[in-house]
Structure formats: C-alpha cells, structure tokens
Amino acid sequence: MDSVLAIEVKKVCKYFGSFCALDHIDLEIREGEFFALLGPNGAGKTTLINTIAGLALADSGSVHVMGNHVVNQYRLARRQLGVVPQELVFDPFFTVRETLIIQSGYYGISKNKTWIDEIIERLGLTDKAHANMRALSGGMKRRVMVAQALVHKPPVIILDEPTAGVDVELRQSLWDFIKQLNIEGHTIVLTTHYLEEAEALCSRVAMLKQGKVIALNSIQSLINTMTAGYSLRLRLQPDNLPPGLQEKQVTHHNGFYELRMDSYRQIESVLAQLRENKIQILEMQLLQPDLEAVFVNLMKNPVSET
C-alpha cells in the first residue's frame, strides 16, 4: 500500500481581486521529507502556506494534509499540521509556559506537561519558562512560536522564515532540534531566504515565481542543470599563466586567475601544465555551482505563460 502524502496540492489557484497569487500549483511532499519552498518576495510562498493551513481558501483546486482535505476535513487536517509563521505573533500577558498550555487547550489536550517540558528544554527555553512573553528577545519569541507549533505533536511542520533576525547561536540550536524532529519522522517544509540553509538541510526544493512553480527537483539535480560548470581559482608564483591555459575563459582579478572547466578531470591537466612551466601554486580554490546560483539563474528567466 502506498504511503499517504504529507502534503498534496492539486491545481490550486488563488486570486486577490484581479491579482493571481497562486497559478495552478501542483505539489506533492512525501512523509518524512525535509522540503524547501523558495522564491523571491511576492512569489506566493506565504499564500501557499496559508492555503495549506486553511487560513486562506483556494479559488480552485484542492489541498490535502496527511490525506485530509483542508476544507472538508479541516479539523483533521489542522491537527496534522504545525505552522511557524513569519511574523512574531504573541500574547504579551502570558509567560512562556502559560502560552504553551493555552496552545495545548486549543487542540483539546489537557494533560500535556511532559511534552511541554521536553519542548521547553530542547528549544533552550528552560530559563525563560516563567518569563513574560513581552520580556523576551526576538530570537526567544521565535523559539516560543516553534514550540507553539509543536505542542500537539503534528506530523507535518511548516516553518516560514524561522531564522529571520535570529543570531547564529540560536539558529544553530534551532536547526539541531528541527533536524532531530525530521529524523524522528516529522515532515518539515521550510521557506527561507538563506539558501545555504536550504541546501544544507533539505533534500528537495520547489521554486516559486509570480505564483507558479518554475522548478521542482532534488537540490543536486537542480545544481547539475547549471551549464556554467566549475571554476578553478589560482594565485600563482610567478604571476603568469602558461599559454596552454590562456584559452580557458580566463579572468584575472585581485591576483587570482579563474579558469572555467566542464569537469573535475580537467584539474589534473591544469596542474600538469603548471608543473611543466615551473609555476608554483600559492592558493587554489575550486568553485562549484550551488543552490544560490541555480536560484539566481532561474529568477532571471521570464515565467512561461503555459
């Protein structure tokens, strides 16, 4: 028997007046995936998240969370989902622990102390458990929002820009916790402008532009589509490139030569020619296409109307 998809989006369209925010979105996210949803501001990421969460109604198409229709079976769908919104939303009159107890009550969970204690500890909130929400720093408030999304133990977690404005230490500890949740079987959907985070954490990515999915694949497969190949940056002594290497789309900047290559195999040829000409390598860097290069390249292209 095939496993249930964590999130299934079929032909979803969403309009705000005459503006099309989501244009026939098709998306399937499997159980246990760590999935990235990327795009520039205004691409439709938050609108799509709101549609999945039932906070916005699609004008056409359908959305299911763990097999439950987000409109017709909204109670079941919302129990399967935890969402950390981009904005900091909190009640300033409650402590951290009170906030989590109240959040548990929204889901009808009355005896949740053990899990709340574990969340507080794993998110580094133990010292702040009895602090008032309005007294917390922005990074700590964001941790509490993650905790709120987890109080009912949802199998699917959506994180909308969770590390925006968070310092390096908080960011690292947050990702350690989220990665552990993913290892334990939770499906994680991440939106972020830090593309290095998506590349390090996620297995697949969907890129949105103008309300359309313009790329959907594994990160490595997307990187492999880049035709620019590799670049070898060299600082040499003497500062002189052999004639046999000067044909390789060379640039020379800040004391570094940059040679374009199609594969790793060409590195040995470069090194051999440098040895033959008694040229010493002072510094060497191999630059490879990454997710950011893919993103920038795709966003330059016009969106297909079909």
Image (tube, rainbow, N blue to C red):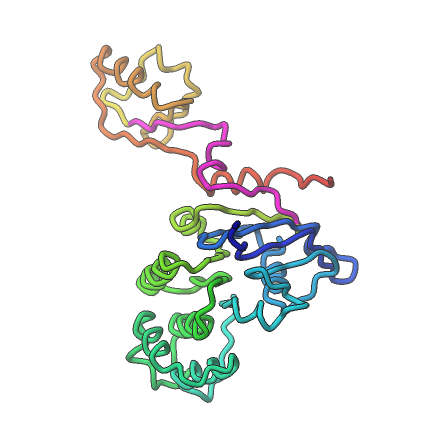
At 38% from the left and 48% from the top, the residue drawn is 200
Say whether residue 228 is magenta.
yes
- In the displayed structure, 1 sits above or below 290; it is below
Q: Residue furthest bottom?
A: 93
What residue is shown at x 39% (from left), y 57% (from top)? Answer: 182
Q: Nearer the viewer, residue 49 or 234?
A: 49
Residue 96 position within the rendered picture, expressed as x and y whole percent measured from the top left:
39, 82
In the figure, 16 relative to 33: above or below?
below
In this rendering, the answer to whether 260 lies above or below 92 is above
Q: Is residue 207 magenta?
A: no
Please state the horizontal and vertical placement of residue 14, each as a whole percent of the image. 71, 58
Please indicate whether residue 295 sits to the left or right of residue 123 in the image.
right
Q: Taking 175 as reference, is 139 above or below it? A: below
**Rendered residue at 55%/60% (across/down):** 66
What x and y, as percent, mark residue 160? 51, 62
Magenta stretch bounds: 212-234
User: Is 199 situated left or right of 13 in this image?
Assistant: left
Residue plotted at (39% across, 23% down): 263
Q: Residue furthest front?
A: 1
